């Protein structure tokens, strides 16, 4: 039923059509009383619907802002409160920045014309949405930049997929190209200043920048040259936008014989200035190294193992080369050293190199000796003084090894000073202690045979000890003596050396227990080749007519030279009709042997002369005596 009055007005609020129920209500308001109309409007304000609450709040706020601007009145703080949630603001910002049409749906308040590709044309002005302080504005600017960055990444991925790269490969690579993405984004923004791109979309400008840079064909070419996508990403970032320098440096590395598998690693480790250097500078370094003994066909290997050489200028390289030449290395030794361990030349600082050389001289080595040592084992330059050498020296000194002993170890086997103390040396020493070797015996072993410390404990030393105790007849009580006297035995191959010798000795008629006693007396018995043993044994049995027991009692017989000692001394004994034990015959110097022979001859002559004198003085008494003693 309608209310009657002088003048009625039919009022239908637009917001009610959005928030009301399915049958919007018509409200008749007496316009003669505006206050009554406002009270009636507030009283009958319907409850907003849930699904359109955000769009309705935005529309109400937009209309209220428009009315406030027309009335030129200052709104209250409650009226300025933005009803749009923060998430909705971000979505609106994305729609404003992304130049791509979004799907439409019935009832959408952001109408979009199919002929207008600009999404922003149908959106409300952003200044009506983001009305806040400087902090909020700065935050929104950063979010806008991040959105543009994501748009640029998508454009880059699209260009790579157009270049027939897989989705996974494109995503993995683009995720590592943050700096280059920013470069493309900035260049695309700069293109808008040009007249021909003033009305173009951001997507088009970003795509133009990517195509002009030829980055996608470059990525294809680098991948063809065996570079992984992390290496490609780092190189693109190192180029600082000058992508053509990457191709130039790759071609140069290939010209000096750097293989494809090492090109990426060489470029990444050669310093940030490598891409900016000219071919002439790099060629001068190569020529100088070649003039000092580094062969041309070695250059690719050297530069791939030590690409840091390419970060130095020519004067720096000359200083480093002269550092080794001053220690007495010639061109051949220097070139070989650089080939064996290229990092010795270019990886370490000059100050560190001088400190290590000075430390090695403290063992009593001269400068030329250190040079020979580094030429033979340049890996010493990779060892730290504080972490590797000083703990090793203290450990060896604890077992009684003097500085001269360490010097001998360093000269004979410099690799000992390169191995890890806790992981390599300590377990071996503890193993020898468990066998029963004393500390003095361990010190003598290490000084006598330093390579022992470089052998594998579980693959070399323990298997040999087990073989000696099970197959060579060495008892548990004698194994410590065998190891201490013959540490070189622990370096022999079981199958090719020890088993062959054991079978040969057993074939001579020596029993296993006797062989164990022989090895305990002379451990080096098992190290000789059977080709050397056979002639000596044949001469012993056939020419010298000695028994096998003589050999068992003196196993060191096999250690003497057949032509140099055994045959000459045997001839002397035969000529003088002398027969002595093998030990007396061989285990002495030539002077002692001659003196022994003369003493035996003098004693024999003395006895013979006394007998002859007795025979001439009392011949009858001797005969009578003989007769009387006969029964």
Image (cartoon, rainbow, N blue to C red):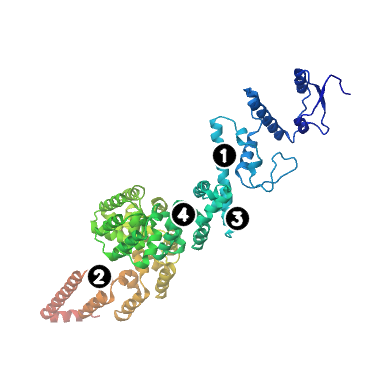
Q: How far is mark 2 from mark 4, CA to CA?
A: 77 Å
Q: Nearer the viewer, mark 1 or mark 4?
A: 1
How far apart, in angstroms, are the residues tagged by discs 4 and 3?
A: 21 Å
Badge 1 element: helix
Q: Quadrant of the N terminus?
A: top right
Task: Give the label on residue 167, or none.
Answer: 3
**Residue 175: horizontal and vertical position, in percent?**
54, 50
The quadrant holding residue 413 is: bottom left
Q: Label 2 vs label 3: CA separation? A: 87 Å
SS class of the residue under badge 2? helix
Q: Residues within 10 Å of mark 3 (few under 14, many from 20)?
A: few
Tell me which residue sits at (64%, 29%) in the image: 82
Q: Residue furthest right?
A: 1
Q: Going by the image, does 266 lie left or right of 143? A: left
From the image, tell me which residue sits under label 4. 235
Query: How far separated are the C-alphas under marks 1 and 3?
Result: 26 Å
Residue that numbered label 1 is attached to: 143
Relative to the observer, which residue lies in front, 519 or 337? 337
Residue 165 seen in the current view: no
Which residue is disc 2 drawn over?
584
Query: Where on the picture, by quarter, is residue 596?
Result: bottom left
Measure the alpha-carbon separation of dots 1 and 4: 28 Å
Q: Within 10 Å of the Cα at label 2, are there few (<14), some (14-19), or many (20+) other Cα atoms?
A: few
Lower position in the chain sequence, tag 2 or tag 1 = 1
For the residues labelled 2 and 1, say whether their Cβ atoms are less than 8 Å apart: no
Decide: is 14 above or below 564: above
């Amino acid at each position: 039923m309608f209310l009657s009055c002088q003048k009625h007005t039919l009022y239908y609020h637009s917001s009610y059509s959005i928030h009301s129920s399915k049958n919007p209500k018509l409200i008749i308001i007496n316009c003669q009383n505006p206050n009554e109309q406002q009270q009636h409007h507030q009283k009958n304000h319907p409850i907003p619907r849930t699904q359109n609450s955000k769009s309705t709040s935005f529309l109400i706020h937009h209309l209220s802002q428009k009315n406030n601007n027309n009335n030129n009145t200052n709104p209250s703080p409650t009226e300025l409160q933005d009803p749009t949630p923060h998430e909705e603001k971000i979505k609106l910002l994305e729609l404003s920045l992304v130049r791509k049409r979004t799907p439409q749906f019935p009832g959408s308040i952001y109408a979009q014309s199919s002929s207008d590709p600009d999404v922003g044309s149908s959106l409300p002005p952003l200044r009506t949405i983001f009305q806040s302080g400087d902090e909020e504005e700065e935050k929104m600017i950063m979010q806008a930049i991040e959105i543009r960055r994501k748009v640029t990444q998508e454009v880059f991925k699209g260009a790579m997929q157009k270049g027939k790269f897989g989705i996974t490969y494109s995503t993995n690579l683009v995720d590592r190209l943050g700096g280059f993405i920013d470069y493309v984004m900035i260049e695309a923004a700069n293109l808008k200043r040009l007249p021909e791109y003033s009305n173009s979309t951001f997507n088009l400008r970003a795509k133009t920048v990517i195509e002009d840079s030829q980055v996608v064909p470059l990525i294809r070419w680098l991948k063809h040259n065996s570079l992984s996508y992390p290496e490609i990403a780092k190189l693109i970032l190192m180029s600082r936008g000058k992508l053509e320098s990457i191709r130039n440096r790759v071609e140069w590395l290939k010209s000096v014989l750097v293989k494809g598998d090492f090109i990426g690693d060489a470029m990444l480790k050669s310093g940030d200035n490598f891409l900016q250097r000219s071919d002439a500078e790099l060629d001068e370094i190569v020529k100088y190294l070649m003039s000092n003994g580094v062969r041309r066909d070695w250059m690719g290997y050297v530069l791939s193992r030590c690409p840091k050489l390419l970060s130095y200028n020519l004067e720096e390289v000359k200083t480093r080369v002269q550092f080794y030449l001053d220690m007495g290395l010639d061109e051949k030794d220097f070139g070989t050293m650089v080939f064996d361990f290229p990092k010795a030349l270019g990886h370490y600082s000059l100050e560190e190199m001088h400190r290590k050389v000075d430390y090695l001289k403290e063992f009593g080595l001269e400068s030329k000796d250190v040079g020979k040592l580094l030429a033979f084992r340049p890996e010493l330059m990779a060892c730290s003084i504080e972490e590797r050498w000083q703990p090793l020296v203290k450990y060896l000194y604890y077992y009684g090894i003097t500085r001269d002993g360490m010097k001998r170890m360093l000269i004979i086997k410099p690799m000992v000073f390169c191995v890890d103390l806790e992981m390599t040396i300590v377990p071996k020493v503890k193993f020898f202690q468990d066998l029963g070797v004393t500390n003095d015996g361990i010190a003598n072993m290490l000084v006598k045979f330093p390579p022992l410390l470089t052998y594998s404990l579980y693959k070399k030393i323990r298997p040999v000890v087990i073989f000696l105790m099970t197959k060579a007849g060495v008892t548990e009580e004698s194994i410590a003596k065998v190891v201490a006297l013959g540490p070189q035995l622990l370096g022999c191959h079981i199958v090719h050396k020890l088993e062959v010798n054991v079978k040969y000795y057993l074939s001579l008629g020596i029993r296993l227990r006797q062989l164990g006693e022989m090895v305990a007396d002379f451990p080096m018995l098992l190290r000789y080749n059977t080709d050397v043993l056979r002639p000596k044994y044949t001469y012993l049995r056939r020419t010298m007519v000695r028994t096998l027991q003589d050999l068992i009692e003196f196993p060191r017989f096999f250690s003497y030279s057949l032509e140099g000692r055994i045959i000459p001394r045997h001839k002397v004994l035969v000529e003088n009709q002398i027969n002595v034990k093998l030990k007396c015959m061989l285990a002495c110097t030539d002077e002692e042997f001659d003196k022994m022979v003369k003493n035996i001859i003098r004693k024999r002559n003395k006895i013979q002369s006394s007998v002859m004198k007795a025979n001439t003085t009392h011949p009858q008494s001797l005969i009578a005596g003989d007769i009387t003693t006969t029964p």
